[in-house]
Image (tube, helix red, strand yellow):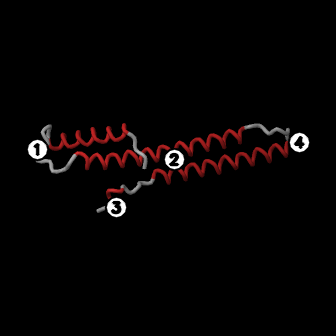
Amino acid sequence: MKTDAGQIATAHVAAEEILRTIYGDDLLGCSVRPEAIASIIQDTLAQQLEIDHEMLGVYEKAIEALHLLSTPPTDKPAGPGELSTLLGERLDAVRELTRRLIDAAASIKQPRINAHQTEE
C-alpha cells in the first residue's frame, strides 16, 4: 500500500498522543515504542485510502454509465412501441447498474483484515 509523508506524520502524531493519553506526558512505564503504534495507524490509514480510491472509481464509472443511459438516442424512435422498448431497456440497465453499485459498496465496506492481526 502506498503511503505518503503526510500520512506517516499523522500516524506518528496520533501514536504519540495515544501513548500520552494512556501513560501521561512523560510516558513513564510505557514499554511500547511510538513507532510500533504508528505502524498500526499507518496501515489503517492506508487501507482506508485504498477503500476511498475504490469507491471513487466505482462512482466515476457509475456516473459515466448513467450519463450514457440518459443521453437521447441519435436516431429518433419510429413510434411509441419502439420508444417504450428503448425506455424499458434503459430502465432495466439503470436497475442493473444500481444493483451492481449496491453490491460493490457492500463488498468494499466489508472489514478488511489488518496485516498486524494476521501476524499474531
The CA span between labels 4 and 1 is 82 Å
Percent from the top left, x then y, of residue 36? Answer: 25, 50
Say whether residue 13 is left or right of residue 74.
left
Identify the secondary structure beneath mark 2.
helix
Residue at mark 1: 28
Identify which amino acid the numbered label 4 is placed on: Ala
Identify the secondary structure beneath mark 4.
loop
Identify which amino acid the numbered label 1 is placed on: Leu
| Nearer the camera: disc 2 or disc 1 | 1
Identify which amino acid the numbered label 2 is placed on: Glu
Residue that appears at 70% across and 49% down: 92
Quadrant of res 6:
top left
Q: Earlier in the sequence, mark 3 or mark 4?
A: 4
- Label 4–label 1 contact, CB within 8 A: no
| Nearer the camera: disc 2 or disc 4 | 2
- The residue nearer to you, when weighing 18 against 106, is 18
Residue at mark 3: 118
- Label 3–label 4 contact, CB within 8 A: no
| Nearer the camera: disc 3 or disc 4 | 3
Rate crowding at label 3 as few (under 14), some (14 to 19) or many (20 or more) other CA atoms within 10 Å. Answer: few
Identify the secondary structure beneath mark 1.
loop
Residue at mark 4: 78
Rate crowding at label 2 as few (under 14), some (14 to 19) or many (20 or more) other CA atoms within 10 Å. Answer: some
The CA span between labels 3 and 4 is 62 Å
Rate crowding at label 1 as few (under 14), some (14 to 19) or many (20 or more) other CA atoms within 10 Å. Answer: few
Identify the secondary structure beneath mark 3.
helix
- Which of the numbered marks, if any, corresponds to residue 94? none
